[in-house]
């Protein structure tokens, strides 16, 4: 009989330990659930704020401005490099050619005007 009591006593002890562990696990699960809910609400607020920004178009407009500025800067630098290369090679730049075309057009008009005048009036 004494042995039966010791076995029953040990079973009761193990049962008590298991119940205590289950209670502790239950408390931790409840705390974990609360933490998840808290994080979920914070993330929901953050997402709502991001959506509000996206809907307003502010980030897109800012990116468009930055892209336009970068494009202008790249064009400016490329034009400068092109002018340097053409200068080194001794080739006229686009603006030089445009200036020459204007001058040729002006001189052409002058020559045409002189050609139309009678020879004795010069």
Image (tube, helix red, strand yellow):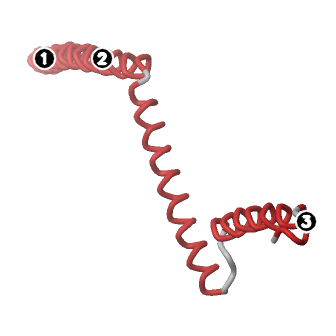
Q: Residue 118 carries which label?
A: 3
Q: Residue 88 carries which label?
A: none
Using the numbered discs, state the Cα–Cα distance from disc 3 to disc 1 in whole angstroms. 124 Å
Residue 53 at what x, y percent from top left?
37, 21
**Total label count?**
3
The answer, for residue 16, to whether it is visible in the render is yes
Q: Look at 58% across and 74% down and name the residue there.
A: 83
Residue linked to disc 1: 20
Residue linked to disc 2: 40
In the image, 86: left or right of 60? Answer: right
Residue 108 at what x, y percent from top left?
81, 65
Q: Quadrant of residue 109?
A: bottom right
Q: Look at 27% across and 14% down and name the residue there.
A: 41
Q: Callout 2: helix, strand or loop? A: helix
Residue 106 at what x, y percent from top left?
73, 62
| Vertical relation: 105 (above or below) 39 | below
Q: Earlier in the sequence, mark 3 or mark 1?
A: 1
In the image, 114: left or right of 75? Answer: right
Q: Residues within 10 Å of mark 3 (few under 14, many from 20)?
A: few
Q: Which of 51 and 56 is in front in this view?
A: 56
Q: In which quarter of the image is the N terminus?
A: top left
């Amino acid at each position: 009989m004494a042995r039966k009591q010791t076995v029953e006593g040990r079973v009761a002890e193990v049962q008590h330990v298991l119940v205590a562990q289950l209670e502790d696990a239950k408390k931790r699960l409840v705390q974990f659930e609360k933490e998840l809910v808290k994080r979920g609400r914070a993330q929901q607020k953050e997402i709502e704020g991001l959506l509000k920004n996206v809907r307003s178009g502010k980030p897109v407009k800012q990116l468009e401005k930055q892209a336009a500025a970068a494009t202008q800067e790249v064009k400016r630098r490329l034009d400068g490099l092109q002018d340097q290369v053409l200068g080194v090679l001794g080739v006229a730049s686009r603006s030089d050619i445009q200036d020459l075309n204007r001058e040729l057009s002006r001189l052409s008009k002058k020559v045409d005007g002189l050609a139309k005048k009678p020879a004795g009036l010069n």
